[in-house]
Image (cartoon, helix red, strand yellow):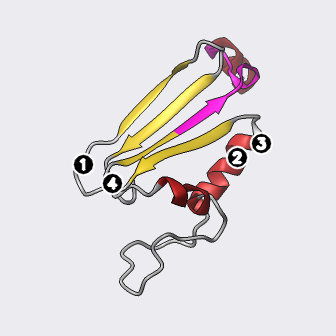
């Protein structure tokens, strides 16, 4: 979303996949990236826009930290993107990480 124009739409979707895994996806309509640049974007401290005219701040840790957090829960984070088409980030978490409302309330009390 950081690379989306102000006021552009961002779509969030969530649901259970046929295999019982929880799927969460976020789609923006920002600058996107070339598919071959996705591995770089997921690497710690890597930045795709490193020029002196860079418009966005950051040290290149947001996506790598998100990947590690999802993986710590046994899940995956996948990016699908194309230049000028935006990006979709999809997180999949295994059924063992899903709690019912009752289970959540029980651990909160």
Please tell me which of labels 4 and 3 falls first in the chain: 4
Query: Residue at image x 56%, y 27%?
Result: 23
Query: Residue at image x 67%, y 29%?
Result: 93
Q: CA distance from mark 4 to mark 2?
A: 24 Å
Residue 47, x across and y down, in percent: 53, 71
Q: According to the image, label 1 marks what residue?
A: 8
Q: According to the image, label 2 marks what residue?
A: 69
Q: CA distance from mark 4 to mark 3?
A: 28 Å
Does residue 7 appear to the left or right of 40 in the view shown? left
Report if the CB atoms under discs 4 and 2 are less than 8 Å apart: no
Q: CA distance from mark 1 to mark 4?
A: 8 Å
Camera-near label (4 vs 3) is: 4
Report if the CB atoms under discs 1 and 4 are less than 8 Å apart: yes
For label 4, the crowd category at 10 Å Cα-Cα, with few meaning under 14, some 14 to 19 and many 20 or more, is many
Does residue 45 appear to the left or right of 54 in the view shown? right
Residue 95 included in the magenta stretch of the image: yes
Please tell me which of labels 1 and 3 falls first in the chain: 1
Disc 3 secondary structure class: helix
Residue 93 included in the magenta stretch of the image: yes
Please tell me which of labels 4 and 2 falls first in the chain: 4
Query: Residue at image x 48%, y 79%?
Result: 50
Q: According to the image, label 4 marks what residue?
A: 30
Q: Which mark is residue 87?
A: none
Report if the CB atoms under discs 2 and 3 are less than 8 Å apart: yes
Q: CA distance from mark 2 to mark 3?
A: 5 Å
Disc 4 secondary structure class: loop
Above or below, comparing residue 56 to residue 82 in the picture: below
Q: According to the image, label 3 marks what residue?
A: 72
Please tell me which of labels 2 and 1 falls first in the chain: 1
Magenta segment, which residues?
90-101
Camera-near label (4 vs 2) is: 4
Quadrant, the C terminus: top right
């Amino acid at each position: 979303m950081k690379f989306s124009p102000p006021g552009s739409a961002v779509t969030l979707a969530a649901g259970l996949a046929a295999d019982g895994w929880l799927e969460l996806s976020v789609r923006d309509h920002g600058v996107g990236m070339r598919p071959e640049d996705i591995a770089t974007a997921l690497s710690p401290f890597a930045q795709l826009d490193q020029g002196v005219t860079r418009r966005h701040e950051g040290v290149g840790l947001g996506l790598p930290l998100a990947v590690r957090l999802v993986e710590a829960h046994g899940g995956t984070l996948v990016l699908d993107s194309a230049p000028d088409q935006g990006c979709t980030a999809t997180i999949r978490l295994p059924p063992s990480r899903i709690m019912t409302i009752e289970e959540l309330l029980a651990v909160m009390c």
